[in-house]
Amino acid sequence: MQNQYCLALAELRSRPAHELKEVGDQWRTPENIFWGINAMFGPLVLDLFSDGENSKCEAYYTAEVNALTQDWSLKLAGLNGAAFGNPPYSRASQHDGEYITGMRYIMQHASAMRDKGGRYVFLIKAATSEVWWPEDADHISFIRGRLGFDLPSWFIPKDEKQVPTGAFFAGAVAVFDKTWRGPAMSYINRADLEARGNAFIAQIRREALRLLPQMPQQNIPEVIPDAADEAVGSAVEQQQAREVPLPEPGSNCEDDLPLLQEHILSQSGIRAWACVRAAFGDKVEYTFKESKFAHVWASDNVSAPTVVTVSAGDIAVAEVLIMEKELHMAVSEWLDKEFEATDPARYHMQERLNTAGMEAMNEYAMAIPVFLSVIQSMEPTARGNIRSIRATLKDYMSKASSQEDAA
């Protein structure tokens, strides 16, 4: 029998609209915060508290499994890494005599697992006066700056007032690891933690881009056709701006969707093209099922799909492809106004700007319009040297950061 906590969550998620006060335990850790913690205390390979869709790691526990009844140390032994938890803060609740929530009991279980071996890393409130505060943690890193969290993917705002403020509470990272040999306490600025996370994410994207030409053509996984068939209806509702509609549920006509890579790009857009490339490799033509899966994924959410199953590696590849293609098209549109189509200098300028643009997006999270505005402000002769371009972009970001600090 499913526990009451899970039943209540399922009922909440099924509602047609939600209020912020109802989100409760379901606030999600921002990606750059998680990857920043991963860079400091990882590799993080086991998510202790997931709803099955918001997991930060490939291995995870849900409330149905109840992490507080599991031997985390045994699980970690085969994963070669550490466990991560952004724990639920709701009042303690039980099922069949076992606690499934309650910070006091979560911290107690973490202490017990620590004694058995392994590293357990928690993102928690910096609430030192609470009875659950982990005095026995081997390390506490206090985060300077209040943390904001992400809404769950299922959240549908009831009205325009349901907008998060972005500032919730002071946070800390608690580490349980009996082999810890560092200091008992430290501090880190939120901006530094986010910067570490962004750098880690940029590395993942660069590696995905490097590996992309080496990716073999993949066979469509058995799970994909069913997942895509079931998802078509909801994906259509989520994406009204599509130029080419998805096939009606139950349709199996290959005329419904473009199959050639060039047609997917021209008719369905960059996201569908990136999804089919990421999932099935660089092919001239795709099968109907492959094309349909890619369109459903693109219509859902490329970075956090909920209606189809996509690996983290494929997501990273798709994100890189989207960034690269959007940058290439924006640069091309600008260069069309600056050069004749047959001018050989145009090709070399395109290459330089594509390289510098991808670096700026990865290292500085710079938006494409900002990148182009900086390039356009440069002396035309300086644009001919990629080192000058990089120096100009770095100088721009340094000045922008100084202005933010002064404000």
Image (cartoon, grey):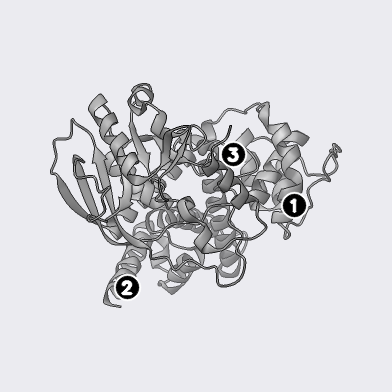
Question: Residue 350 versus residue 233: which sits nearer the camera?
Answer: 233
Q: Which residue is mark 2?
A: 404
Q: Amino acid at mark 3?
A: Ala
Give SS at disc 1. Answer: helix
- C-alpha distance separating marks 2 and 1: 40 Å
Residue 338 shows in the view:
yes
**Rendered position, 400 above or below 204:** below
- Which residue is at a point 35% across and 26% down the rendered structure image? 76
Task: Pick the quarter of the image with the C terminus.
Answer: bottom left
Indicate the position of residue 384 as horizontal and vertical percent values. 42, 61
- C-alpha distance separating marks 3 and 1: 21 Å
Give SS at disc 3. Answer: helix
Residue 166: name its quadrant.
bottom left
Residue 278 circle label: 3
Residue 121: name its quadrant.
top left
- Which residue is at a point 67% across and 47% down the rendered structure image? 272
**Dot 1 surroundings within 10 Å: few (below 14), some, or many (20 or more)?**
some
Q: Which residue is mark 1?
A: 236
Left or right placement of residue 12 versus residue 236 in this view: left
Left or right placement of residue 250 versus residue 401 in this view: right
Question: Residue 109 versus residue 55: which sits nearer the camera?
Answer: 109
**Rendered position, 166 above or below 218:** below
Task: Pick the quarter of the image with the N terminus.
Answer: top right
**Dot 3 surroundings within 10 Å: few (below 14), some, or many (20 or more)?**
many
Q: Earlier in the sequence, mark 3 or mark 1?
A: 1
- Which residue is at a point 30% across and 58% down the rendered structure image? 190
Q: Nearer the viewer, mark 3 or mark 1?
A: 1
Left or right placement of residue 387 versus residue 1 in this view: left
